[in-house]
Image: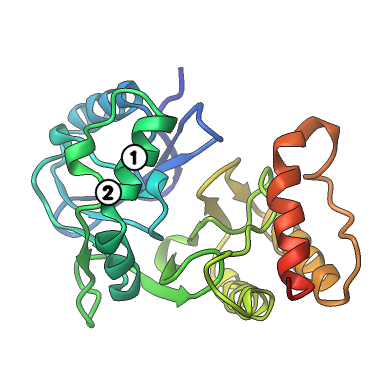
């Protein structure tokens, strides 16, 4: 069973069995902010138990991007605002029924009535601590959160040790968008000793630079029209072959 693990001051992570998805708990001034909680209903219940033991109220949620597995919630977390960038909130609202259908198909015991109930983050970003780094790689309105005072970068679906970069098939120019996003995350990572990806292990110390280098190398190979050489690909991860082929085709303009 996964546990809620502290990875930095006021930052805790609990990992799901479903694609190594990370639920992130950030201590704010007024209470806890839940970032991308998931995935199965039983895991959401267990996360709620963890939060109850902390004895600190949940005051807000944050969705890093509008993919179904980042749009989940549970009644036990409370009826609090759940934020995303305005662009991501718009997509989540427009595609709510699709997100509910995908959640029902892919995971068990999820409160479907709470899927994708997202509010646009105000311009001052005050409900969420840290710096919001918005970009268009992987999904519209994708956001990372830099908690510079704690040395933590919450990266969303970037900088994973298990997932290759996934280009968004609904957007053009994703190779350039991904390169721009990585450059921004690299600048942010100068202020972080810990990177929490949406999926996979938390990176600490020199692992942070290694994650950036791996994603840079993959995107650079796509840009040059070459086959990426990436340790995340191979017989151990056959399920990534489809997204990888889609990346190659998009990079070639197909």
Taking the image as shown, residue 53 lies to the left or right of residue 177, namely: left
- x then y, percent, for residue 252: 79, 73
Which residue is painted at 13% across and 43% down in the image?
57
Is residue 216 among what the camera can see? Answer: yes
* Res 119 quadrant in image: bottom left
55, 242: nearer the viewer: 242
Which residue is painted at 21% across and 26% down in the image?
53
Q: Are marks 1 and 2 in contact (CB under 8 Å)?
A: yes
Is residue 213 among what the camera can see? Answer: no
Disc sitting over residue 97 in the figure: 2
Please tell me how crowded label 1 is: few (under 14), some (14-19), or many (20+) other residues with Cα within 10 Å. Answer: few
State the residue position of label 1: 101
* Res 127 quadrant in image: bottom left
As drawn, 63 above or below 68: below
Which residue is painted at 80% across and 31% down in the image?
236
As drawn, 69 above or below 152: above
212, 199: nearer the viewer: 199
């Amino acid at each position: 069973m996964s546990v809620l693990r502290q990875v930095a001051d006021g930052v805790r992570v609990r990992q799901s069995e479903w694609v190594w998805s990370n639920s992130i708990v950030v201590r704010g001034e007024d209470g806890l902010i839940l970032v991308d909680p998931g995935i199965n209903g039983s895991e959401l219940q267990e996360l709620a138990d963890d939060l109850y033991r902390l004895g600190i109220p949940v005051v807000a949620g944050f969705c890093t991007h509008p993919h179904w597995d980042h749009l989940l919630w549970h009644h036990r977390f409370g009826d609090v605002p759940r934020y995303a960038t305005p662009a991501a909130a718009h997509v989540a609202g427009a595609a709510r029924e699709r997100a509910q259908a995908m959640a029902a198909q892919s995971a068990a015991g999820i409160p479907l009535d709470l899927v994708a109930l997202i509010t646009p983050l105000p311009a001052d970003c005050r409900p969420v601590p840290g710096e919001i780094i918005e970009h268009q790689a992987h999904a519209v309105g994708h956001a990372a959160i830099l908690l510079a005072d704690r040395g933590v970068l919450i990266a969303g679906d970037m900088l994973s040790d298990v997932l290759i970069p996934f280009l968004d098939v609904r957007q053009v120019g994703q190779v350039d968008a991904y390169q721009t996003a990585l450059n921004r995350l690299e600048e942010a990572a100068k202020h972080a000793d810990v990177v929490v990806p949406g999926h996979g292990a938390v990176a600490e110390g020199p692992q942070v630079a290694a994650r950036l280098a791996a994603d840079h190398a993959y995107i650079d190979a796509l840009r040059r029209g070459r086959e990426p050489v990436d340790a995340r690909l191979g017989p151990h991860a056959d399920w990534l072959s489809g997204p990888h082929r889609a990346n190659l085709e998009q990079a070639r303009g197909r």
